[in-house]
Amino acid sequence: MKKVIALVIAAAMMLSLATTAFAASEALIDPVADWGQYDEMVAQIKSETDMAKRTELMHAAEDVLMATYCVIPLYYYNDIFLQKDYVDGIFCNPFQTKFFMYATMSNGSDTLKLQLSSEPDYLDPALNSSVDGACLAANTFSGLYTYNAENKTVPACATGYEVSEDGLTYTVTLREGLLWSDGTPLTAADFEYSWKRAASPATAADYAYMFNGFDGYEAGDINVTAVDDVTLQFVLTAPCAYIEDLMAFPTFYPVQKAWVEEHATAEAPGAWCQEAGFPSNGAYVCTAWSHDTSMTYEKNPNWYDADKVTINKLEFMLSADDTAIFAAYNDGSIDFADSVPTDEIASLKDNPEFHIIDALGTYYAAFNCSSPLFEGKTVEQAAAMREAFSLLIDRDYICENVGQTGQIAANAYIPVGMADGNGGVFKTDIETGYYDPYAINNDYEGTVAKAIELLESAGYVFNDGMLSAETPINIEYLTNTSSGHVAVAESMQQDFAAIGINMTIQQEDWNVFLEDRKNGNFDFAREGWIADFNDPINMLEMWITESGNNDCQFGR
């Protein structure tokens, strides 16, 4: 096995030096039976101490991922929202986490009315894996570190830390006098409990793999210890350049042991925060929750930085109806809207209340590698089918007519501009990638012919450029109900229909959609990944077999 892995890495490294020319077959492995090779690659990256070699290994891992054509990048993200001109002080990091605790309002109100999403899937910071859930967590809980308005990591519950000479042992000092929202003391023991809980297989956290760089992870007991009330010590297996980003990430937030163990169950570990009233340690506390309608958060006077919070209440509108959200914003029912109808974007571009900000992530579509669509196909034939779908997508149309805010068509999964972990940039421009994202625009006939050729290699029959009735392709695309996502689906549906592929669109409510996608109940699905921190490993390790974010079902 080790020899096979070495050969895969070597071949992929050679490919990573190429630009738009990419011989996928040379890096292709069976995404079901042989995915352990990818797992080993990621493990090697996580343990590599030579940062230049680590960067090369990450390029190689992306080559292997992209060779499957299960991940179909469409464009690189930016973030848009509407914010009233009397609101100031809200800030957002490149990972689309929005911080409301330092907001101010010049209209005399101390209540900020917002829309982030529909009913959240989880409020438990260990179980959440959605952007809206991360925003709620960041305003309700506080980790050891956080982000400031300049997108820099800064101490939160911690005051700082020391690192051993070998870069493996961290000793973190907490602030004195930390409290939970219910007034009980918050100590280093709360962090020890919470981190071990999040890493435990029994919790089944999607992000448990973020602890796989900790000593003891493989044995099921990560090496983190509360030395005393204000001292937390943890040990890694290799130096980690993004450790402060991890300490600022929701999965690493503390939860109150007594409350969790009283209200959670083995079957529902997140049940402790499925209703309002649970203790937290952030700027706000959830005090009311009318499911699928609204949530209310009130200022937590026990937060360590409470004297800087001037907004006493956050009122969230829970909705995925873009039209209703836009109407609520326009009539003054909400002050902040994180969702905008696609057909309104063009008219809003010159409106100073319409904000477009940079983000670090990729909007994509994904195939379930174990879908019945690929039954009876070889690994190469299944990859050829997926590559054909990718070629047929008019990404330029999606960017210009659906996104409409300057999105860049994507030709790789890891976005342009992401750091490489070695003082440089992983990809500096869109010229370096795995395919020409504008091929369908610049050479329509040639690109369609290539797609047909790939499908023919997988056993499909064509007559005069159209798929024959004797070898039909019927596929279902799963998406949530937001107008922009549906518009993307409809665009691809039309692209595929041009050669006779029949794609139906299945729309689901947000939390149902998340569960079906995570559990592999789809053929082809809407996806998007906003980076959790600025290092490519974040976008690579999510695809290891055990990851709760492995929607493609690699290795399963």
Image: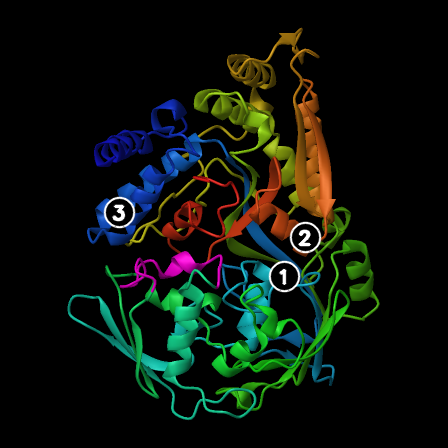
Residue 512: mark in rendering: 2
- In the image, what residue type sits under mark 2? Val
> In the structure shown, which secondary structural element does the residue marked by tag 1 occupy?
loop
Residue count near mark 1 (Cα–Cα under 10 Å), binned few <14, some 14–19, many ≥20: some
Tell me the distance, in whole angstroms, between the alpha carbons under discs 3 and 1. Answer: 33 Å
Q: For the image shown, how many numbered marks are present on the structure? A: 3
Q: Say if the magenta span includes residue 208.
A: yes
Residue 535 % position (x, y): 37, 54
Q: Residues within 10 Å of mark 2 (few under 14, many from 20)?
A: few
Q: Report, in whole angstroms, how far the alpha carbon at label 3 lies from the one at label 2.
A: 35 Å
Q: In the rendered view, would you say 299 is above or below 317?
A: below
Distance in Å between CA atoms under marks 2 and 1 = 9 Å
Question: Where in the figure is residue 460, as x and y percent of width and height?
Answer: 59, 13
Q: Position of residue 342 (x, y in %)?
A: 73, 47
Q: Residue at x 40, y 86 (%)?
A: 187
Picture coordinates of residue 128, whole percent (x, y): 55, 62
Give, as a three-letter code, the residue at label 1: Asp
Residue 481 to residue 522: above or below: below
- Tag 3: residue type? Gln
Judging by the rendered image, the residue that carries numbered circle 3 is 44
